[in-house]
Amino acid sequence: MTSNHQNAVIYIAGVDEAGRGPLAGDVFAAAVVLSPEYAIDGLADSKKLSEKKRDYLAPIIKARATAWAIASASVAEIDDMNILQATLLAMKRAVEQLGVNPTEVLIDGNRAPQLAFPTRTIIGGDATIAEISAASILAKTARDASLMVLHAKYPEYAFDRHKGYGTALHMAKLKEWGPCPEHRRSFATVRVLLVNANT
């Protein structure tokens, strides 16, 4: 009698986030299970790749991965529960939307959401674990695309150029226009501007 365990499929899911630091927009997370049959060249930490390279790799990851999912937590959720908890929520949503049950979930960083699967955190995992690198790229490209949508809605803030990060350009636009509904009011930089505007 043969044991079914010998034929058990192993699904390693990599998870990473994008958008913890910016002053505006949702926080995104992605989960990816790579296929051993379809290698993807060029995977790396999304922050080390050019926008062009990320945009090139994202559809390849989606086409060749065994499973992938992208999820987010809204600005309202960020302001309600804080950015760390909102990031963990986005990660949890991504893993739960994978469509397969991971054998193990590898998460970039040192904090993990509560999941129903074995979970391990890996600091710097986006640079060393292919599954996390792939997740990093999907999360980053999805978030950047969402900021282009915000730019179309609020062109005065130049979201297409700074992607919501607290650059000098963004700070100048914030001081000129005040926060829009997509700015994170729980972030001190935005909160100070709101207080100043109301005094």
Image (cartoon, rainbow, N blue to C red):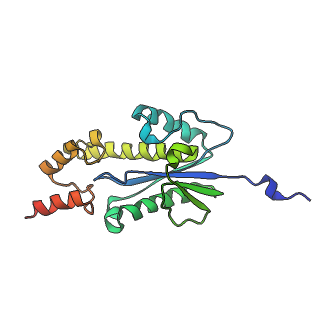
151 to 188, vertically: above or below: above
Q: How many marks?
A: 0
Q: Please name the residue shown 46% across and 53% down the image.
A: 29
Residue at (36% x, 46% y) in the render: 146
- The reply to whether residue 196 is visible in this rendering is yes
Residue at the front extreme? 123
Q: In this view of the protein, can residue 102 be seen by the observer?
A: no
Image quadrant where one finds the N terminus: bottom right
Q: Is residue 183 above or below residue 116?
A: above
Q: Quadrant of residue 116?
A: bottom right
Whole-percent x and y of residue 96? 55, 60
Left or right of residue 189, residue 73 in this image: right
Q: Residue at x 36, y 59 (%)?
A: 74
Q: Nearer the viewer, residue 184 or 63?
A: 184
The residue that appears at 55% across and 44% down in the rendered structure is 128
Q: Position of residue 191 (x, y in %)?
A: 20, 61
- Residue 181 appears at what percent x and percent y? 24, 57
Q: Furthest residue to the right?
A: 1
Image quarter hosting the C terminus = bottom left
Give percent across and percent down for residue 21.
33, 52
Nearest the eye: 44 or 157:
44
